[in-house]
């Protein structure tokens, strides 16, 4: 399995995902992303990727 480094991930082609959520879940996601961005210095795309990667790993997808 190839290990992907952060620079490669940042330059990878992006796709758009549209998700319909309850308003409280939407606000929680945005708040969590904002905290990751401001506490770690990640870009918004890096923060979104990290949140979704954690979700997928948790559910073994």
Image: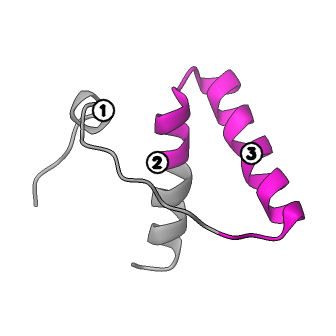
Left or right, 35 with respect to 40, comes to right
Q: Percent position (x, y) of residue 52?
A: 51, 58
Q: Split into 4 quadrants, where in the image is the C terminus?
A: bottom left
Q: Which residues are magenta?
A: 20-49
Q: Which mark is residue 21?
A: none
Q: Quadrant of residue 41?
A: top right
Find disc 3 in the rendering and name its residue. 30
Q: Is residue 50 magenta?
A: no
Earlier sequence position, callout 1 versus callout 3: 1
Q: Where 5 sits versus 51, above or below?
A: above
- Which residue occupies 67% across, 41% down? 33
The answer to the question of whether label 2 and label 1 lie on touching residues, with beta carbons closer than 8 A, is: no
Q: Secondary structure at mark 3?
A: helix
Report, in whole angstroms, how far the alpha carbon at label 3 lies from the one at label 2.
Answer: 13 Å
Q: Percent position (x, y) of residue 47?
A: 55, 39
Q: Where 36 sits versus 29, above or below?
A: above
User: What is the residue that sits farthest to the left in this orientation?
Assistant: 1
Earlier sequence position, callout 3 versus callout 2: 3
Q: Quadrant of residue 55?
A: bottom right
- Which residue occupies 46% across, 48% down? 49
Q: Percent position (x, y) of residue 23?
A: 87, 63
């Amino acid at each position: 399995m190839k290990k992907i480094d952060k620079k490669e991930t940042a330059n990878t082609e992006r796709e758009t995902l549209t998700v319909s959520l309850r308003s409280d879940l939407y606000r929680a996601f945005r708040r969590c992303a904002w905290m990751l961005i401001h506490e770690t210095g990640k870009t918004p795309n890096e923060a979104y990727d990290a949140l979704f990667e954690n979700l997928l790993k948790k559910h073994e997808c």
